[in-house]
Image (cartoon, rainbow, N blue to C red):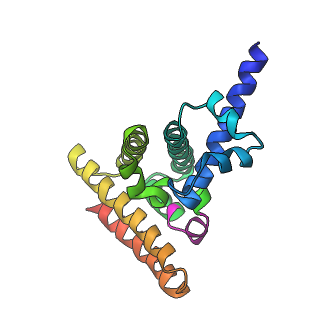
Amino acid sequence: MRRSAEEKAETRRQIVRAAGRMIRERGLSETCVADVMTETGLTHGGFYRHFESKEALAAAAVDSAFAHMRARLEQITAQAPAGKKLAALIETYLTEAHRDQPQHGCVMASVGMEAQRAGGVVQAAYEDGISKLLALFAAQIEAPTRQQRDDRSQVVLSVMVGGLLLARALRNDPAGSKRALTNARKAALAAAAG
């Protein structure tokens, strides 16, 4: 019985990972349960053993994508030298590799307003993920007050996500796309400094 529960939990994780990749690559509305289940080698009917609805799956996938991103960014801050942690986060996020691989990248840049329109548990998972990222960034910012750190972290994260979106939108203009990443890195660092 215990082995069965472990297998079920692992299958659920596989479904969530597949959904997360698809959601970041295609968006929420273009990700369907049948495709997710096919990707994991399971039947559409088996979906309801793990989730009560597509919305529950989307919320779990969004939550998982944010958790994965936070873990990666926390690892980067742990390895960066003192005084360079925020710069390391910004440099890691605003790369050509991140621009070119949305299925493995930031869920904010992939689903943005779609998560807000979805409402309910999806919106709640999205907002929770953003709040936790803002806290991670605020912890790396030096400012006289907590409010200033929080405000600067919002600006930094906004510039980073916006810069990534602009770079993706300009893929047919490689030089412009690369400039968008470079300019966003500069702007994010300047915003952090106040």
Is residue 88 magenta-colored? Answer: no
Residue 95: within the magenta? yes
Q: Tell me which residue sits at (69%, 35%) in the image.
A: 45
* Above/below status of 187 relative to 9: below
Residue positioned most to the front: 45
Quarter placement of the N terminus:
top right
Instruction: Give whichever of 169, 41 is nearer the camera.
Output: 41
Q: Please give left or right for residue 31 compared with residue 151 in the image.
A: right
Look at 57% across and 53% down and name the residue there: 31
Out of 149 and 172, give the one closest to the viewer. 172
To which quarter of the image does residue 48 belong?
top right
- The foreground one among 64 and 124 is 124
Residue 132 sits in quarter: top left
Q: How many marks?
A: 0
Predominant secondary structure in magenta?
helix
Whether residue 148 is visible here, answered yes or no, is yes
Q: Give the x, y percent position of residue 143.
A: 26, 51
Q: Position of residue 63 (x, y in %)?
A: 50, 40
Residue 145, visible in the rendered structure: no
Q: Position of residue 98 (x, y in %)?
A: 57, 65
In the current view of this chain or complex, which residue is farthest to the top?
1
- Which residue is rendered at x = 42% and y = 47% of the image? 133
Describe residue 113's horizontal placement relative to residue 37 as left or right: left
**The magenta segment:** 93-101
Q: Please provide percent x and percent y for residue 81.
A: 51, 53
Above or below, comparing residue 125 to residue 80 in the picture: above
